[in-house]
Protein backbone atom coordinates (compact mmCIF):
# COMPACT_ATOMS: atom_id res chain seq x y z
CA UNK A 1 0.00 0.00 0.00
CA UNK A 2 1.42 3.44 -0.87
CA UNK A 3 2.56 5.43 2.20
CA UNK A 4 0.04 8.24 1.59
CA UNK A 5 -2.98 5.90 1.83
CA UNK A 6 -4.33 5.61 5.39
CA UNK A 7 -4.50 2.13 6.93
CA UNK A 8 -7.70 0.16 6.48
CA UNK A 9 -9.91 0.26 9.57
CA UNK A 10 -11.43 -3.00 10.76
CA UNK A 11 -14.82 -1.83 9.58
CA UNK A 12 -17.33 -3.14 7.08
CA UNK A 13 -19.31 -0.94 4.72
CA UNK A 14 -22.86 -2.20 4.29
CA UNK A 15 -24.64 -0.64 1.33
CA UNK A 16 -28.41 -0.81 1.79
CA UNK A 17 -30.43 -0.48 4.99
CA UNK A 18 -33.27 -2.86 4.27
CA UNK A 19 -33.81 -5.96 6.42
CA UNK A 20 -30.81 -7.77 4.92
CA UNK A 21 -28.33 -4.97 5.59
CA UNK A 22 -29.77 -4.33 9.03
CA UNK A 23 -29.48 -8.00 10.03
CA UNK A 24 -25.91 -8.16 8.77
CA UNK A 25 -25.03 -5.09 10.84
CA UNK A 26 -26.69 -6.69 13.89
CA UNK A 27 -24.75 -9.95 13.44
CA UNK A 28 -21.49 -8.00 13.30
CA UNK A 29 -22.45 -5.73 16.20
CA UNK A 30 -22.93 -8.60 18.63
CA UNK A 31 -19.33 -9.58 17.84
CA UNK A 32 -18.18 -6.07 18.76
CA UNK A 33 -17.72 -5.00 15.13
CA UNK A 34 -19.07 -1.65 14.03
CA UNK A 35 -20.27 -1.49 10.43
CA UNK A 36 -20.90 1.70 8.51
CA UNK A 37 -24.44 1.43 7.14
CA UNK A 38 -25.39 3.67 4.20
CA UNK A 39 -28.68 3.93 2.33
CA UNK A 40 -29.42 5.73 -0.93
CA UNK A 41 -33.00 6.60 0.06
CA UNK A 42 -33.41 9.69 2.20
CA UNK A 43 -36.24 8.14 4.25
CA UNK A 44 -37.55 4.65 4.98
CA UNK A 45 -39.91 3.28 2.37
CA UNK A 46 -43.59 3.54 3.35
CA UNK A 47 -44.48 0.50 1.25
CA UNK A 48 -45.15 -2.89 2.77
CA UNK A 49 -42.92 -4.89 0.44
CA UNK A 50 -42.61 -8.04 2.53
CA UNK A 51 -44.91 -9.30 5.27
CA UNK A 52 -44.28 -12.96 6.04
CA UNK A 53 -41.51 -13.88 8.46
CA UNK A 54 -40.74 -17.57 8.29
CA UNK A 55 -40.24 -19.83 11.32
CA UNK A 56 -36.55 -20.07 10.45
CA UNK A 57 -36.14 -16.29 10.30
CA UNK A 58 -37.82 -16.05 13.70
CA UNK A 59 -35.19 -18.47 15.01
CA UNK A 60 -32.55 -16.08 13.67
CA UNK A 61 -34.29 -13.14 15.35
CA UNK A 62 -34.53 -15.17 18.56
CA UNK A 63 -30.77 -15.69 18.43
CA UNK A 64 -30.33 -11.92 18.00
CA UNK A 65 -32.72 -11.19 20.88
CA UNK A 66 -35.42 -9.66 18.67
CA UNK A 67 -38.09 -12.33 18.26
CA UNK A 68 -40.24 -10.93 21.06
CA UNK A 69 -40.34 -7.45 19.54
CA UNK A 70 -41.33 -8.81 16.15
CA UNK A 71 -44.07 -11.00 17.61
CA UNK A 72 -45.45 -7.98 19.47
CA UNK A 73 -45.52 -5.98 16.22
CA UNK A 74 -47.02 -8.74 14.09
CA UNK A 75 -49.91 -11.09 13.47
CA UNK A 76 -49.72 -14.87 13.26
CA UNK A 77 -50.64 -16.04 9.75
CA UNK A 78 -52.88 -18.93 10.74
CA UNK A 79 -54.44 -20.08 7.50
CA UNK A 80 -55.56 -19.54 3.94
CA UNK A 81 -58.88 -19.39 2.11
CA UNK A 82 -58.42 -20.45 -1.52
CA UNK A 83 -61.03 -19.59 -4.16
CA UNK A 84 -60.32 -21.26 -7.48
CA UNK A 85 -62.77 -20.26 -10.19
CA UNK A 86 -65.32 -23.03 -10.69
CA UNK A 87 -64.54 -24.89 -7.46
CA UNK A 88 -65.81 -24.67 -3.85
CA UNK A 89 -63.86 -22.54 -1.39
CA UNK A 90 -61.10 -24.38 0.45
CA UNK A 91 -59.93 -23.51 3.97
CA UNK A 92 -56.39 -24.44 5.02
CA UNK A 93 -55.11 -24.19 8.59
CA UNK A 94 -51.43 -23.49 9.27
CA UNK A 95 -50.65 -25.86 12.12
CA UNK A 96 -47.08 -25.21 13.21
CA UNK A 97 -47.71 -26.02 16.87
CA UNK A 98 -44.86 -28.54 16.82
CA UNK A 99 -42.33 -25.86 15.79
CA UNK A 100 -40.60 -23.20 17.90
CA UNK A 101 -42.34 -20.50 15.88
CA UNK A 102 -45.19 -20.32 13.38
CA UNK A 103 -45.49 -18.01 10.35
CA UNK A 104 -45.65 -14.36 11.41
CA UNK A 105 -46.92 -11.36 9.50
CA UNK A 106 -45.05 -8.09 10.09
CA UNK A 107 -45.01 -5.21 7.58
CA UNK A 108 -41.49 -4.70 6.29
CA UNK A 109 -41.35 -1.12 7.53
CA UNK A 110 -42.01 -2.39 11.08
CA UNK A 111 -39.30 -5.05 10.73
CA UNK A 112 -36.87 -2.37 9.58
CA UNK A 113 -37.83 -0.07 12.46
CA UNK A 114 -37.23 -2.81 15.06
CA UNK A 115 -33.86 -3.69 13.57
CA UNK A 116 -32.82 -0.03 13.30
CA UNK A 117 -33.75 0.59 16.93
CA UNK A 118 -31.72 -2.46 17.94
CA UNK A 119 -28.68 -1.12 16.07
CA UNK A 120 -29.14 2.31 17.63
CA UNK A 121 -28.77 0.67 21.03
CA UNK A 122 -25.36 -0.50 19.79
CA UNK A 123 -24.51 3.03 18.70
CA UNK A 124 -24.93 2.25 15.00
CA UNK A 125 -27.04 4.57 12.87
CA UNK A 126 -28.15 4.61 9.25
CA UNK A 127 -26.54 7.23 7.01
CA UNK A 128 -29.39 8.13 4.64
CA UNK A 129 -29.12 9.89 1.31
CA UNK A 130 -25.67 8.36 0.74
CA UNK A 131 -25.23 6.76 -2.69
CA UNK A 132 -22.34 4.50 -3.63
CA UNK A 133 -20.92 5.24 -7.09
CA UNK A 134 -17.65 3.33 -7.22
CA UNK A 135 -15.47 0.63 -5.66
CA UNK A 136 -11.75 -0.05 -6.03
CA UNK A 137 -10.15 -2.87 -4.06
CA UNK A 138 -6.65 -4.15 -3.52
CA UNK A 139 -5.10 -6.78 -1.30
CA UNK A 140 -5.47 -4.62 1.80
CA UNK A 141 -8.94 -3.17 1.55
CA UNK A 142 -11.64 -1.48 -0.51
CA UNK A 143 -12.04 2.19 -1.38
CA UNK A 144 -15.65 3.26 -1.76
CA UNK A 145 -16.62 6.47 -3.55
CA UNK A 146 -19.93 8.22 -2.92
CA UNK A 147 -22.08 10.53 -5.01
CA UNK A 148 -21.12 13.58 -2.93
CA UNK A 149 -17.48 13.10 -3.96
CA UNK A 150 -16.30 11.66 -0.65
CA UNK A 151 -14.39 8.39 -0.35
CA UNK A 152 -13.42 6.02 2.43
CA UNK A 153 -11.54 2.75 2.81
CA UNK A 154 -12.92 -0.36 4.41
CA UNK A 155 -11.77 -3.84 5.17
CA UNK A 156 -14.79 -5.33 3.35
CA UNK A 157 -17.90 -4.09 1.54
CA UNK A 158 -21.23 -5.90 1.36
CA UNK A 159 -23.96 -4.86 -1.05
CA UNK A 160 -27.41 -5.40 0.46
CA UNK A 161 -28.80 -2.81 -1.94
CA UNK A 162 -31.50 -4.74 -3.74
CA UNK A 163 -32.26 -5.80 -7.27
CA UNK A 164 -30.64 -2.66 -8.74
CA UNK A 165 -27.48 -3.15 -6.64
CA UNK A 166 -24.76 -0.56 -7.20
CA UNK A 167 -22.28 -2.94 -5.59
CA UNK A 168 -23.12 -5.75 -8.01
CA UNK A 169 -22.80 -3.35 -10.94
CA UNK A 170 -19.47 -2.04 -9.63
CA UNK A 171 -18.14 -5.60 -9.59
CA UNK A 172 -19.51 -6.29 -13.06
CA UNK A 173 -21.32 -9.42 -11.89
CA UNK A 174 -23.84 -10.72 -14.46
CA UNK A 175 -27.44 -10.86 -13.20
CA UNK A 176 -29.02 -13.12 -15.75
CA UNK A 177 -32.68 -13.97 -16.04
CA UNK A 178 -35.90 -12.53 -17.35
CA UNK A 179 -38.87 -10.43 -16.33
CA UNK A 180 -42.51 -11.30 -16.52
CA UNK A 181 -44.15 -9.17 -19.21
CA UNK A 182 -47.06 -7.97 -17.08
CA UNK A 183 -47.05 -5.52 -14.18
CA UNK A 184 -48.76 -5.96 -10.83
CA UNK A 185 -50.57 -3.78 -8.31
CA UNK A 186 -50.12 -3.57 -4.55
CA UNK A 187 -52.31 -1.72 -2.10
CA UNK A 188 -52.94 -1.30 1.63
CA UNK A 189 -56.71 -1.28 2.10
CA UNK A 190 -59.49 -1.96 4.56
CA UNK A 191 -61.78 -4.92 3.78
CA UNK A 192 -64.88 -5.73 5.82
CA UNK A 193 -65.77 -9.39 5.25
CA UNK A 194 -66.12 -12.72 7.05
CA UNK A 195 -62.48 -13.79 6.72
CA UNK A 196 -61.13 -14.79 10.17
CA UNK A 197 -58.36 -12.65 11.60
CA UNK A 198 -54.92 -13.92 10.63
CA UNK A 199 -56.15 -15.69 7.51
CA UNK A 200 -55.03 -14.85 3.98
CA UNK A 201 -57.14 -15.17 0.84
CA UNK A 202 -56.10 -16.29 -2.64
CA UNK A 203 -58.73 -15.94 -5.40
CA UNK A 204 -57.50 -17.48 -8.63
CA UNK A 205 -58.74 -17.89 -12.19
CA UNK A 206 -56.24 -20.22 -13.92
CA UNK A 207 -55.22 -19.60 -17.51
CA UNK A 208 -53.82 -22.27 -19.84
CA UNK A 209 -50.06 -21.89 -20.37
CA UNK A 210 -50.00 -18.47 -18.72
CA UNK A 211 -49.91 -16.96 -15.22
CA UNK A 212 -53.37 -16.90 -13.62
CA UNK A 213 -55.59 -13.94 -12.93
CA UNK A 214 -55.54 -13.55 -9.15
CA UNK A 215 -56.45 -11.46 -6.13
CA UNK A 216 -54.33 -12.00 -3.00
CA UNK A 217 -55.10 -10.44 0.38
CA UNK A 218 -52.55 -10.83 3.20
CA UNK A 219 -53.70 -9.67 6.64
CA UNK A 220 -51.86 -6.86 8.39
CA UNK A 221 -51.63 -6.55 12.18
CA UNK A 222 -54.18 -3.74 12.30
CA UNK A 223 -57.67 -5.25 12.42
CA UNK A 224 -59.47 -5.22 9.08
CA UNK A 225 -56.46 -4.14 7.00
CA UNK A 226 -54.86 -6.12 4.19
CA UNK A 227 -52.11 -5.82 1.67
CA UNK A 228 -53.66 -6.82 -1.64
CA UNK A 229 -51.87 -7.75 -4.85
CA UNK A 230 -53.03 -8.62 -8.37
CA UNK A 231 -52.20 -8.23 -12.05
CA UNK A 232 -52.43 -4.60 -13.18
CA UNK A 233 -54.47 -3.57 -16.23
CA UNK A 234 -52.28 -3.08 -19.30
CA UNK A 235 -52.77 0.68 -19.29
CA UNK A 236 -50.75 0.79 -16.04
CA UNK A 237 -47.85 -1.31 -17.32
CA UNK A 238 -44.63 0.72 -17.53
CA UNK A 239 -42.86 1.02 -20.86
CA UNK A 240 -39.15 0.61 -21.39
CA UNK A 241 -36.67 -2.02 -20.34
CA UNK A 242 -35.76 -1.98 -16.68
CA UNK A 243 -35.82 1.73 -16.05
CA UNK A 244 -32.78 3.79 -15.16
CA UNK A 245 -30.99 1.01 -13.27
CA UNK A 246 -31.50 -1.82 -15.72
CA UNK A 247 -33.54 -4.49 -13.87
CA UNK A 248 -37.32 -4.80 -14.03
CA UNK A 249 -38.14 -5.82 -10.49
CA UNK A 250 -39.77 -4.41 -7.41
CA UNK A 251 -41.94 -1.44 -6.56
CA UNK A 252 -41.84 1.39 -9.07
CA UNK A 253 -41.81 4.20 -6.53
CA UNK A 254 -41.31 6.85 -9.22
CA UNK A 255 -44.62 5.99 -10.91
CA UNK A 256 -48.17 6.71 -9.73
CA UNK A 257 -49.82 3.81 -7.94
CA UNK A 258 -53.12 2.20 -8.79
CA UNK A 259 -56.41 3.83 -7.83
CA UNK A 260 -58.82 2.20 -5.39
CA UNK A 261 -61.16 1.61 -8.32
CA UNK A 262 -58.46 -0.43 -10.08
CA UNK A 263 -58.12 -2.73 -7.07
CA UNK A 264 -61.88 -2.97 -6.62
CA UNK A 265 -62.33 -3.96 -10.27
CA UNK A 266 -60.21 -7.09 -9.77
CA UNK A 267 -61.98 -7.94 -6.50
CA UNK A 268 -65.34 -7.65 -8.26
CA UNK A 269 -64.13 -9.92 -11.05
CA UNK A 270 -62.66 -12.70 -8.89
CA UNK A 271 -64.45 -12.69 -5.52
CA UNK A 272 -67.96 -14.08 -4.93
CA UNK A 273 -70.15 -11.48 -3.20
CA UNK A 274 -67.25 -9.05 -3.51
CA UNK A 275 -66.68 -6.85 -0.47
CA UNK A 276 -65.99 -3.16 -0.75
CA UNK A 277 -62.34 -2.10 -0.52
CA UNK A 278 -61.86 1.21 1.26
CA UNK A 279 -59.41 3.56 2.97
CA UNK A 280 -56.54 3.09 0.50
CA UNK A 281 -53.40 4.19 2.39
CA UNK A 282 -50.94 3.56 -0.41
CA UNK A 283 -50.68 1.68 -3.67
CA UNK A 284 -47.94 0.92 -6.16
CA UNK A 285 -47.12 -0.76 -9.41
CA UNK A 286 -44.44 -3.43 -9.28
CA UNK A 287 -42.62 -5.79 -11.62
CA UNK A 288 -41.33 -9.33 -11.10
CA UNK A 289 -38.14 -10.81 -12.52
CA UNK A 290 -36.33 -14.10 -12.00
CA UNK A 291 -32.58 -13.51 -11.82
CA UNK A 292 -29.56 -15.02 -10.07
CA UNK A 293 -26.15 -13.39 -9.73
CA UNK A 294 -23.35 -15.30 -11.44
CA UNK A 295 -21.29 -15.01 -8.27
CA UNK A 296 -21.82 -13.65 -4.77
CA UNK A 297 -18.74 -11.49 -4.51
CA UNK A 298 -15.22 -10.80 -5.56
CA UNK A 299 -12.21 -10.38 -3.31
CA UNK A 300 -13.25 -8.32 -0.30
CA UNK A 301 -16.65 -7.34 -1.69
CA UNK A 302 -19.83 -9.41 -1.37
CA UNK A 303 -23.52 -9.11 -2.21
CA UNK A 304 -26.53 -10.47 -0.35
CA UNK A 305 -30.32 -10.60 -0.58
CA UNK A 306 -32.06 -9.19 -3.65
CA UNK A 307 -28.68 -8.06 -4.97
CA UNK A 308 -28.05 -11.80 -5.52
CA UNK A 309 -31.45 -13.28 -6.29
CA UNK A 310 -34.92 -12.07 -7.27
CA UNK A 311 -38.00 -14.13 -7.96
CA UNK A 312 -41.81 -14.13 -7.57
CA UNK A 313 -43.04 -13.29 -4.05
CA UNK A 314 -44.98 -16.57 -3.77
CA UNK A 315 -44.43 -18.17 -0.38
CA UNK A 316 -42.84 -15.06 1.12
CA UNK A 317 -39.29 -16.29 0.49
CA UNK A 318 -37.49 -13.19 -0.78
CA UNK A 319 -36.74 -11.13 2.34
CA UNK A 320 -36.32 -14.27 4.41
CA UNK A 321 -33.78 -15.79 2.02
CA UNK A 322 -31.86 -12.53 2.11
CA UNK A 323 -31.84 -12.52 5.91
CA UNK A 324 -30.43 -16.05 5.85
CA UNK A 325 -27.71 -14.78 3.48
CA UNK A 326 -26.79 -12.08 5.99
CA UNK A 327 -26.83 -14.52 8.92
CA UNK A 328 -24.53 -16.89 7.01
CA UNK A 329 -22.07 -14.26 5.81
CA UNK A 330 -22.10 -12.26 9.04
CA UNK A 331 -20.58 -14.83 11.38
CA UNK A 332 -17.91 -15.75 8.83
CA UNK A 333 -16.96 -12.13 8.23
CA UNK A 334 -16.82 -11.49 11.98
CA UNK A 335 -14.54 -14.50 12.53
CA UNK A 336 -12.13 -13.23 9.86
CA UNK A 337 -12.13 -9.63 11.13
CA UNK A 338 -11.56 -10.76 14.72
CA UNK A 339 -8.55 -12.79 13.64
CA UNK A 340 -10.20 -16.03 14.60
CA UNK A 341 -10.35 -17.50 11.08
CA UNK A 342 -8.57 -17.17 7.77
CA UNK A 343 -10.10 -15.32 4.79
CA UNK A 344 -10.66 -18.62 2.99
CA UNK A 345 -13.69 -19.14 5.26
CA UNK A 346 -15.51 -16.45 3.26
CA UNK A 347 -15.50 -18.61 0.13
CA UNK A 348 -18.04 -20.90 1.79
CA UNK A 349 -20.67 -18.13 1.73
CA UNK A 350 -21.39 -18.43 -1.99
CA UNK A 351 -20.92 -22.19 -1.98
CA UNK A 352 -23.63 -22.58 0.66
CA UNK A 353 -26.09 -19.85 -0.21
CA UNK A 354 -26.20 -19.77 -4.00
CA UNK A 355 -27.71 -23.28 -4.32
CA UNK A 356 -30.42 -22.22 -1.86
CA UNK A 357 -31.33 -19.27 -4.08
CA UNK A 358 -31.41 -21.50 -7.16
CA UNK A 359 -33.95 -23.75 -5.46
CA UNK A 360 -36.05 -20.80 -4.24
CA UNK A 361 -36.21 -19.25 -7.71
CA UNK A 362 -37.24 -22.53 -9.34
CA UNK A 363 -39.86 -23.29 -6.69
CA UNK A 364 -41.45 -19.84 -6.58
CA UNK A 365 -41.72 -19.68 -10.36
CA UNK A 366 -43.36 -23.12 -10.43
CA UNK A 367 -45.73 -22.17 -7.60
CA UNK A 368 -46.72 -18.96 -9.36
CA UNK A 369 -47.38 -20.64 -12.69
CA UNK A 370 -49.40 -23.44 -11.08
CA UNK A 371 -51.71 -21.21 -9.00
CA UNK A 372 -55.10 -22.89 -9.00
CA UNK A 373 -53.98 -25.90 -11.05
CA UNK A 374 -53.87 -29.50 -9.77
CA UNK A 375 -50.46 -30.37 -8.31
CA UNK A 376 -48.77 -32.79 -5.97
CA UNK A 377 -49.18 -32.04 -2.25
CA UNK A 378 -46.29 -29.95 -0.97
CA UNK A 379 -44.45 -30.54 2.27
CA UNK A 380 -46.08 -28.29 4.88
CA UNK A 381 -42.58 -27.10 5.86
CA UNK A 382 -41.61 -26.15 2.30
CA UNK A 383 -41.91 -22.40 2.88
CA UNK A 384 -40.75 -22.37 6.52
CA UNK A 385 -37.04 -22.52 5.52
CA UNK A 386 -36.52 -25.13 8.24
CA UNK A 387 -35.64 -27.69 5.57
CA UNK A 388 -32.69 -25.68 4.22
CA UNK A 389 -29.44 -27.52 4.89
CA UNK A 390 -25.80 -27.45 3.84
CA UNK A 391 -25.23 -31.19 3.53
CA UNK A 392 -22.26 -31.89 1.31
CA UNK A 393 -21.14 -28.27 1.59
CA UNK A 394 -17.60 -27.03 2.25
CA UNK A 395 -18.18 -26.74 6.02
CA UNK A 396 -19.98 -30.05 6.56
CA UNK A 397 -17.98 -33.11 7.63
CA UNK A 398 -17.85 -36.05 9.99
CA UNK A 399 -19.85 -39.17 10.67
CA UNK A 400 -23.54 -38.85 11.36
CA UNK A 401 -24.57 -39.84 14.87
CA UNK A 402 -28.29 -40.21 15.42
CA UNK A 403 -31.03 -38.68 13.24
CA UNK A 404 -29.08 -35.64 11.99
CA UNK A 405 -26.20 -35.19 9.57
CA UNK A 406 -23.47 -32.57 9.06
CA UNK A 407 -25.01 -29.50 7.43
CA UNK A 408 -28.42 -29.88 9.06
CA UNK A 409 -30.13 -27.16 11.04
CA UNK A 410 -29.81 -27.75 14.80
CA UNK A 411 -33.12 -29.37 15.81
CA UNK A 412 -35.49 -27.92 18.38
CA UNK A 413 -35.08 -29.56 21.78
CA UNK A 414 -37.06 -28.71 24.91
CA UNK A 415 -37.11 -29.98 28.46
CA UNK A 416 -33.42 -29.58 29.35
CA UNK A 417 -32.62 -28.90 33.00
CA UNK A 418 -29.64 -27.29 34.74
CA UNK A 419 -28.62 -27.40 38.35
CA UNK A 420 -29.85 -24.31 40.18
CA UNK A 421 -32.42 -23.35 37.53
CA UNK A 422 -35.96 -24.26 38.45
CA UNK A 423 -37.48 -24.29 34.98
CA UNK A 424 -36.88 -26.33 31.80
CA UNK A 425 -34.75 -24.89 29.03
CA UNK A 426 -34.66 -25.08 25.24
CA UNK A 427 -31.48 -26.10 23.46
CA UNK A 428 -31.80 -22.80 21.58
CA UNK A 429 -31.38 -21.02 24.93
CA UNK A 430 -28.17 -22.91 25.61
CA UNK A 431 -26.52 -22.29 22.22
CA UNK A 432 -27.74 -18.70 21.75
CA UNK A 433 -24.94 -16.31 20.84
CA UNK A 434 -22.20 -15.76 18.27
CA UNK A 435 -19.89 -18.64 19.24
CA UNK A 436 -19.22 -22.09 17.94
CA UNK A 437 -20.66 -24.63 20.38
CA UNK A 438 -19.55 -28.20 20.97
CA UNK A 439 -22.51 -30.33 22.03
CA UNK A 440 -21.66 -33.70 23.49
CA UNK A 441 -24.00 -36.37 24.81
CA UNK A 442 -22.30 -38.74 27.27
CA UNK A 443 -22.93 -40.88 30.31
CA UNK A 444 -21.76 -39.34 33.60
CA UNK A 445 -18.52 -41.33 33.56
CA UNK A 446 -17.58 -39.56 30.31
CA UNK A 447 -17.73 -36.10 31.84
CA UNK A 448 -14.06 -35.84 32.99
CA UNK A 449 -12.87 -36.41 29.42
CA UNK A 450 -15.11 -33.59 28.18
CA UNK A 451 -13.70 -31.26 30.84
CA UNK A 452 -10.24 -32.00 29.49
CA UNK A 453 -11.39 -31.49 25.91
CA UNK A 454 -12.87 -28.08 26.78
CA UNK A 455 -9.53 -27.00 28.23
CA UNK A 456 -7.69 -28.29 25.15
CA UNK A 457 -9.95 -26.41 22.74
CA UNK A 458 -9.58 -23.22 24.76
CA UNK A 459 -5.79 -23.40 24.65
CA UNK A 460 -5.63 -24.41 20.97
CA UNK A 461 -7.94 -21.89 19.26
CA UNK A 462 -8.28 -18.12 19.20
CA UNK A 463 -12.07 -18.46 19.05
CA UNK A 464 -12.71 -21.72 20.90
CA UNK A 465 -16.20 -23.23 20.98
CA UNK A 466 -18.24 -23.24 24.13
CA UNK A 467 -18.77 -26.77 25.42
CA UNK A 468 -22.21 -28.05 26.41
CA UNK A 469 -22.49 -31.55 27.78
CA UNK A 470 -25.86 -33.30 27.88
CA UNK A 471 -26.29 -36.27 30.19
CA UNK A 472 -29.32 -38.46 30.86
CA UNK A 473 -32.05 -37.01 33.02
CA UNK A 474 -31.35 -39.37 35.92
CA UNK A 475 -27.62 -38.56 36.14
CA UNK A 476 -26.25 -36.90 39.31
CA UNK A 477 -26.69 -33.13 39.37
CA UNK A 478 -23.12 -31.81 39.48
CA UNK A 479 -21.52 -28.83 37.79
CA UNK A 480 -18.39 -29.43 35.75
CA UNK A 481 -15.52 -26.94 35.22
CA UNK A 482 -15.26 -25.57 31.71
CA UNK A 483 -18.55 -27.00 30.45
CA UNK A 484 -22.24 -26.23 30.72
CA UNK A 485 -23.90 -29.36 32.05
CA UNK A 486 -27.48 -30.01 30.94
CA UNK A 487 -29.76 -32.91 31.78
CA UNK A 488 -32.00 -34.44 29.14
CA UNK A 489 -34.89 -34.59 31.59
CA UNK A 490 -37.58 -35.04 28.92
CA UNK A 491 -35.55 -37.34 26.64
CA UNK A 492 -36.02 -34.93 23.73
CA UNK A 493 -32.30 -34.39 23.11
CA UNK A 494 -31.67 -38.11 22.64
CA UNK A 495 -34.67 -38.34 20.31
CA UNK A 496 -33.62 -35.35 18.19
CA UNK A 497 -29.83 -35.81 18.01
CA UNK A 498 -28.93 -39.12 19.62
CA UNK A 499 -28.07 -40.57 23.01
CA UNK A 500 -24.33 -40.32 22.42
CA UNK A 501 -21.98 -38.43 20.15
CA UNK A 502 -20.69 -34.92 19.51
CA UNK A 503 -21.94 -32.11 17.30
CA UNK A 504 -20.08 -28.90 16.45
CA UNK A 505 -22.72 -26.19 16.08
CA UNK A 506 -21.82 -23.22 13.90
CA UNK A 507 -22.68 -19.67 14.97
CA UNK A 508 -25.64 -19.74 12.57
CA UNK A 509 -26.96 -22.86 14.34
CA UNK A 510 -26.22 -25.42 11.64
CA UNK A 511 -24.23 -28.57 12.37
CA UNK A 512 -20.69 -28.41 11.01
CA UNK A 513 -19.08 -31.64 12.20
CA UNK A 514 -20.59 -34.68 13.88
CA UNK A 515 -18.78 -37.66 15.35
CA UNK A 516 -17.81 -39.46 18.52
CA UNK A 517 -17.51 -37.47 21.74
CA UNK A 518 -13.96 -38.76 22.31
CA UNK A 519 -12.71 -37.81 18.81
CA UNK A 520 -10.80 -34.72 19.89
CA UNK A 521 -8.48 -34.97 16.90
CA UNK A 522 -11.38 -35.02 14.47
CA UNK A 523 -12.91 -31.94 16.08
CA UNK A 524 -9.65 -29.98 16.02
CA UNK A 525 -8.85 -31.00 12.45
CA UNK A 526 -12.30 -29.86 11.35
CA UNK A 527 -12.13 -26.54 13.17
CA UNK A 528 -8.61 -25.66 12.03
CA UNK A 529 -8.57 -27.19 8.54
CA UNK A 530 -12.10 -27.17 7.15
CA UNK A 531 -13.57 -24.24 9.08
CA UNK A 532 -10.24 -22.40 9.06
CA UNK A 533 -10.30 -21.30 12.70
CA UNK A 534 -6.96 -19.84 13.73
CA UNK A 535 -4.74 -21.60 16.24
CA UNK A 536 -3.28 -19.72 19.17
Image: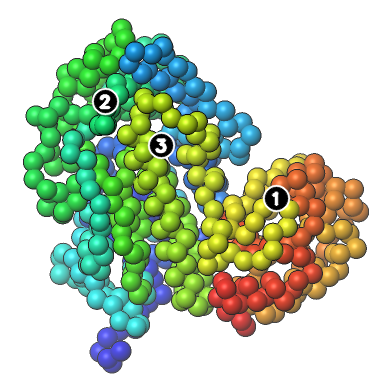
Residue 66 location, x and y as percent? 51, 46
Tell whether 229 sits left or right of 367.
Answer: left
The residue depicted at 87 percent of the width and 58 percent of the height is 443
Residue 406 location, x and y as percent? 62, 60
Tell whether 300 sits left or right of 118.
Answer: left
Give residue 160's quadrant in the image.
bottom left
Sequence-wise, the earlier of marks 1 and 3 is: 3
* Residue with the mark numbered 1: 403
Sequence-wise, the earlier of marks 2 and 3 is: 2
In this rendering, is residue 295 above or below 387? Answer: below
The residue depicted at 22 percent of the width and 33 percent of the height is 184
* Residue with the mark numbered 3: 315
Viewer-nearest residue: 364 or 103: 364
Residue 496 location, x and y as percent? 71, 47
Indicate the secondary structure of the residue bearing disc 2.
strand
Q: Is residue 444 visible?
A: yes
Viewer-nearest residue: 361 or 162: 361
In this rendering, is residue 513 above or below 269? Answer: below
Q: Label 1, label 3: how many angstroms apart (C-alpha)?
A: 28 Å
* Residue with the mark numbered 2: 207
The residue depicted at 30 percent of the width and 81 percent of the height is 138
Tell whether 132 sits left or right of 80.
Answer: left
Local crowd at mark 2 within 10 Å, few (<14), some, or many (≥20)?
A: some
The residue depicted at 13 percent of the width and 42 percent of the height is 254
Q: Which numbered marker is on residue 89?
A: none
Local crowd at mark 1 within 10 Å, few (<14), some, or many (≥20)?
A: few
Amino acid sequence: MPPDVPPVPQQVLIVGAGPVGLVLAAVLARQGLRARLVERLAAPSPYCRAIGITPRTLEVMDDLGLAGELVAAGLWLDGLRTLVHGYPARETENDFSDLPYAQLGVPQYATERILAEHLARHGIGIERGVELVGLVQDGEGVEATFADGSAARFSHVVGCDGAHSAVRRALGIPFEGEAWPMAFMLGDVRIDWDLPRGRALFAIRPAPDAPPDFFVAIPLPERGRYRVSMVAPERLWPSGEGGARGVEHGILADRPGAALADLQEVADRLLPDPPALSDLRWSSIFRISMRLAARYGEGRVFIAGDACHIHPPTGGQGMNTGIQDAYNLGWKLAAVLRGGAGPELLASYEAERRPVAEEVIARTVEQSMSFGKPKKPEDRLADTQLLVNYRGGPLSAGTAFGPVAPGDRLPEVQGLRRHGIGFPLRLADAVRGPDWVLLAAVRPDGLPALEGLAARLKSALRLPPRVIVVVPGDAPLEDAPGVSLHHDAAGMFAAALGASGAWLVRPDKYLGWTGAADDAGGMLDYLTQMAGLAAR
